[in-house]
Image (cartoon, rainbow, N blue to C red):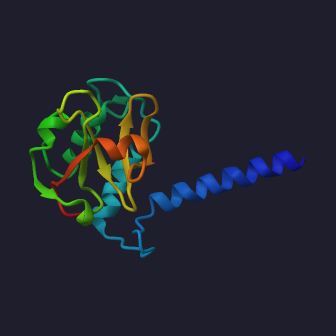
Amino acid sequence: MQIESKKIIARIVVFAAILVCFSGCTSRGELRHNKSRDALITEIRSFKNTPYVYGGSTPSGTDCSGFTMRVFKRFGYNLPHSASKQAKMGRPVSRANLKMGDLVFFRTSKSRAITHVGIYLWSGKMVHASSGKGIIVIKWMGHSYWEKRYAGARRIVDF
């Protein structure tokens, strides 16, 4: 019985963390809701449980740049289906000035090319298409894998 209670509590904690993650709070704990941010979160949520499919760009299967391309299309922005090409769009953003909706780029191969893109949320977190897990939210800042591969950020639209 005690093990079952711990499982229930663990599930409640995970559910609460997911709600907080998608609530729009910033790293300072402030709630900053506005229509465009709410619409961004709604669009991201529409990809929940979407598997990773190389070359895909739909809620039934997508890769990283297909995901960002599809999300931004909802707001009237046509992004190419390529992380390296997306990295040339919009305006550069310093790491210290990242805001929700900024694209964050990574070099995940041995080449110096930009090969991965995600959408910055807040507090060092991003949502992206993981080849192993589909659409997920992770904390990339301070993460041993992602931190070393960070290649910059671009702002396409101010959310």
Q: Along the horizontal axis of the image, is 97 left or right of 143?
A: left
Residue drawn at (31%, 58%), measured in percent from left and top? Answer: 39
Question: Which residue is at the far right?
Answer: 1
Total tally of numbered discs in the picture: 0
Residue drawn at (29%, 41%), measured in percent from left and top? Answer: 149
Quarter of the rendering containing residue 146 = top left
Where does the image place residue 51, in percent across and percent down from the top left?
42, 29
Q: Is residue 83 above or below residue 14?
A: above
Position of the C terminus, as image quadrant, is bottom left
Q: Along the horizontal axis of the image, is 78 left or right of 56?
A: left
Looking at the image, which is closer to me, 121 or 45?
A: 121
Residue drawn at (40%, 65%), measured in percent from left and top? Answer: 24
Q: Along the horizontal axis of the image, is 30 left or right of 107?
A: right
Where does the image place residue 31, in percent across and percent down from the top left?
41, 74
Question: Which residue is at the far top?
Answer: 54
Q: Is residue 55 above or below residue 101?
A: above
Q: Along the horizontal axis of the image, is 7 left or right of 44?
A: right
Where does the image place residue 58, in percent across and percent down from the top left?
31, 32
Where does the image place residue 77, in percent across and percent down from the top left?
14, 48
Quarter of the rendering containing residue 12 = bottom right
